[in-house]
């Protein structure tokens, strides 16, 4: 097993590998995923030193947690296992949200069963429920800690005010928000609060849903869920592709790949930041881990940020319906 650098999530939260593994893409989001291959990917990633795995009950509506659980047979004590609850199916429309206390308990019990574990290391509310006071939801999450079913609590896509209110009920170890060179304004606003409160920050989609890999060169390569995202649609694609070209140019100068440059830049933003890029391929995992060997000077960091200015990306982070559920203030 390879030793990777680690960072602590929050002042007293879990110690995790600086790069974790986001598992969403193992549920067919960006193209068909083979379950046996997914299990192999997870196990090889753990052997490579990644010990922070991120799932959710919404990914494949339970399928993802089942796959992760099967992959961790015999490896459970070597990983920090995170999963999320709160999104619910809403056929024909954007996902609904349920943050009611009774549902929190129900969702956790179901996740434990699918994962085949006795305790979840880090349990996030996936999306804030605007109809339920955050104090009520986090109070129910805190009871899971008291029951020994969860070790640490987290929030995903919560606004700074919601984070403060939640943290006053029970310590929040980590907040998860989309964060990359392309989309960073909301994340950086959130980090003002998380740093003040001593909360770790987990960056999901740190490669801009694949845009920052440099592998998506034209619209014909946009597939799966990406096709629904404004950043990949015709009216926005060319502008975003031009931004990625700037990243590619700097990466060539630094002797690394665009993915490695983007991840190295992100991790250099502070010791509170951990990234969870997702992939279905182990060679991509190895490439991402190469970011840990990319040395960036203060001048490099400024130059990279200037090449893709904050707010320069064209198109919102999600389609309109889903945008209503991110960076959300609770009741």
Image (cartoon, helix red, strand yellow):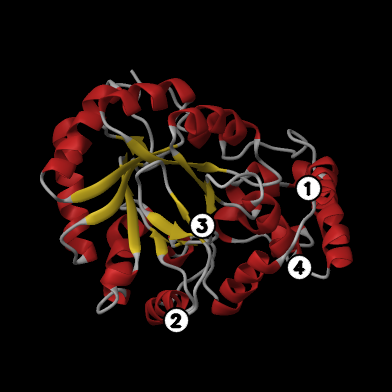
Residue 262 visible somewhere in the drawing: yes
Measure the C-alpha gap from mark 2 to mark 4.
24 Å
Say whether marks 2 and 1 touch (CB < 8 Å). no
Q: Is residue 144 left or right of residue 10?
A: left
- Choose the circle earlier in sequence order: 4 or 1: 4
| Res. 1 mark | 2
Residue that badge 4 annotates: 257
Q: SS at mark 2?
A: loop
| Res. 276 mark | 3
Image height check: is 320 above or below 149? above
Residue that badge 1 annotates: 301
Residue drawn where x is 16% and y is 51% of the image:
149
Residue drawn where x is 28% and y is 54% of the image:
121
Q: SS at mark 1?
A: helix
Q: Residues within 10 Å of mark 4 (few under 14, many from 20)?
A: many
Rendering coords of residue 242 (x, y %): 85, 50
Measure the C-alpha gap from mark 4 to mark 1.
16 Å
3 vs 2, front mark = 2
- Choose the circle earlier in sequence order: 3 or 4: 4
Rendering coords of residue 40 (x, y %): 41, 81
**Image quadrant for the C terminus?**
top left
33 and 90: which is toward the camera: 33
Measure the C-alpha gap from mark 3 to mark 4.
17 Å
Residue drawn where x is 80% and y is 53% of the image:
297
Q: Residues within 10 Å of mark 2 (few under 14, many from 20)?
A: few
- Choose the circle earlier in sequence order: 2 or 4: 2
Q: Residues within 10 Å of mark 3 (few under 14, many from 20)?
A: many
Image height check: is 64 above or below 272? below
Measure the C-alpha gap from mark 3 to mark 1.
20 Å
Q: SS at mark 4?
A: loop
179 and 102: which is toward the camera: 179
- Choose the circle earlier in sequence order: 3 or 1: 3
């Amino acid at each position: 097993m390879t030793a990777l650098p680690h960072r602590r999530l929050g002042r007293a939260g879990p110690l995790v590998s600086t790069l974790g593994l986001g598992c969403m893409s193992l549920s067919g989001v960006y193209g068909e995923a083979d379950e046996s291959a997914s299990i192999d990917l997870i196990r090889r990633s753990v052997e490579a030193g990644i010990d922070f795995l991120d799932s959710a009950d919404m990914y494949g509506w339970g399928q993802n947690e089942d796959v992760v659980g099967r992959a961790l047979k015999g490896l459970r004590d070597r990983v920090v296992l995170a999963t999320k609850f709160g999104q619910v199916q809403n056929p024909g429309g954007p996902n609904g949200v349920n943050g009611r206390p009774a549902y929190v308990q129900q969702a956790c019990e179901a996740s434990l069963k699918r994962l085949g574990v006795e305790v979840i290391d880090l349990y996030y509310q996936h999306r804030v429920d605007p109809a339920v006071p955050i104090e009520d939801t986090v109070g129910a999450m805190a009871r899971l800690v008291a029951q020994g079913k969860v070790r640490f609590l987290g929030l995903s896509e919560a606004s700074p005010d919601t984070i403060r209110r939640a943290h006053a009920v029970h310590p929040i170890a980590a907040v998860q928000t989309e964060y990359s060179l392309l989309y960073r304004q909301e994340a950086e606003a959130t980090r003002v609060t998380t740093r003040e409160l001593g909360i770790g920050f987990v960056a999901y989609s740190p490669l801009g849903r694949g845009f920052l890999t440099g592998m998506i060169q034209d619209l014909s390569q946009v597939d799966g869920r990406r096709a629904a995202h404004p950043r990949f649609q015709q009216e926005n694609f060319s502008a975003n592709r031009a931004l990625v070209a700037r990243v590619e140019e700097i990466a060539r100068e630094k002797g690394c790949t665009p993915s490695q440059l983007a991840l190295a830049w992100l991790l250099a933003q502070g010791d509170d930041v951990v990234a969870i890029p997702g992939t279905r391929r182990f060679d991509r995992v190895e490439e991402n881990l190469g970011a840990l060997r990319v040395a960036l000077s203060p001048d490099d960091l400024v130059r990279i940020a200037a090449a893709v200015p904050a707010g320069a990306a064209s198109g919102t982070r999600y389609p309109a319906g889903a945008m209503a559920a991110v960076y959300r203030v609770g009741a």
